[in-house]
Image (cartoon, rainbow, N blue to C red):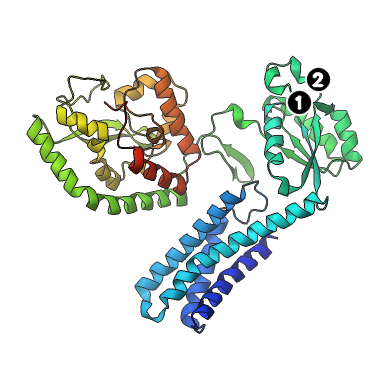
Amino acid sequence: MSAFARIFDSGLILGTLYLAMYQYDVAMNIDYLVPCLVCIAIFQVVAEYNDIYEGWRGAPMFDEALRILFSWLAAFGIVMIGVFFYESTEKYSLDVIKLWIPLAPISIILSYTLKRTFYAVLRKRGLNTRTYAILGANQLGKRLMTALEQMPWLGYKFVGFYDDRGNPKGRKNAKEMDAIEIAGTFTKLLYDAKASKIDHIYITLPLAAEKRIVQMISHLADTTVSVNIVPDFFTFNLIQSKWTNVQGIPVVSVLDTPFNDFDGFLKRIEDLVLCAVILPLISIPMLLIGIGVKLTSKGPMVFKQIRYGINGQKIEVWKFRSMTVTENGHVVKQATKNDSRITPFGAFLRKTSLDELPQFFNVLQGHMSVVGPRPHAVAHNEEYRKQIQGYMLRHKVKPGITGQAQVNGCRGETETLDKMEARIHHDLEYIKKWSLWLDIKIVVKTIIKGFYGNQAY
């Protein structure tokens, strides 16, 4: 099915180019065909990276559509850069290109949507369906059942929960498990599997039950049922978890950075593009702000403070000076409301976050990103890493000028521990769910509402 999907998608890309050329009465020739074939090849590579041809991934159609769109735009953009540098653009019809750009991804997305719809109709009629059971009446099993129920197009029919541990009401998580009804013990599950009443079994037992799981799998090997283990990794604070292998030995990473290999390169390109767009726009305002700082108070125009960067390495973060002091030692007092250290002009800069503008030069240096967890003073890092579990995981990525925490209201003073915990929660969620689209949303939100905050002193 994967090979067929690749061929079909390639045909759609080529076919939509032909339709666009036919619409504007342009004849197909080698000048169009070669770039199109290169575009198809690059699309296949990027689509593979984005798991488009991985079979069932349980992803919503919207998520798959975004992956297809991104893969197409990346492929088309690379080809257009090549054409711009090595070919004369005069030989190409702008009308054809403008029509082909949206037509190709829309046709692919539409084909995937129609395929899902077709399967959903078949499965509603009882065709091409599969039955499944969950071995383990617990929170993980309940989450899995809920997730599968939200995807009816898969055609999975739930048989029930099976568990040898009796009624879940007697357990520690009784309140969460009240709604679970157990269909039977493992013996009953084995009987139903041998009777071909079940096609798939998902084992959601805790990792501590390793020996029991091994015994159960050995018994299930005497059936034709498909057995899947769902590891209970939710007991860990997962950061960019993924499967890898070392000489065939499966390895699961539970704490990792999202910016390895291609994603790291993509993030760097994003930062450079944003800097190329933003710096020319803010150059004159930065000059005026710098003059304002010098005229309104004594001291340097730019304040450079040591903070933690990626992997906990110390970096120098630049800001327009907004205080009469330049604290950079083992003790740094956070700014508070009506803080006497803040200059009148500095209060305006801090309220509007304009004091952060010099950090775009930190981005150019490669020490920071435009979007990421905000860097804290070293003294604050050493204080909070002892109080908040997972605090240092925010340094798995480069610190940012703006971030998910800031656009969700977690700015300014953190006079209570719960405020800092809320900020760290957003930072870790950002690392877990990073995507180019998420960065764009954060940048847009920052422009709309991120330059002002009641808690920014």
Residue 87 appears at what percent x and percent y?
38, 77
Instruction: Name the disc covering residue 180, or none.
Output: 1
Q: Residue at image x 40%, y 70%? A: 82
Q: Residue at image x 17%, y 48%? A: 284
Q: Nearer the viewer, mark 2 or mark 1?
A: 1
The quarter of the image holding the N terminus is bottom right
> Do the residues under discs 2 and 1 have CB atoms within 8 angstroms?
no
Q: In this image, 144 relative to 312: left or right?
A: right
Query: Can I make out residue 269 in this image?
Result: yes
Residue 157 to residue 326: above or below: below
Which residue type does callout 2 highlight?
Answer: Gly
Residue 165 to residue 272: above or below: above
The residue labelled by disc 2 is: 166
Q: In this image, 244 relative to 137: left or right?
A: left
Alpha carbon distance from label 2 to label 1? 11 Å
Looking at this view, is 76 or 226 the one in front?
Answer: 76
Q: Residue at image x 75%, y 17%? A: 169
Query: Can I make out residue 369 in this image?
Result: no
Q: Secondary structure at mark 2?
A: loop
Residue 12 to residue 359: above or below: below
Q: Earlier in the sequence, mark 2 or mark 1?
A: 2
Q: Residue at image x 52%, y 78%? A: 23
Residue 40 appears at what percent x and percent y?
54, 68
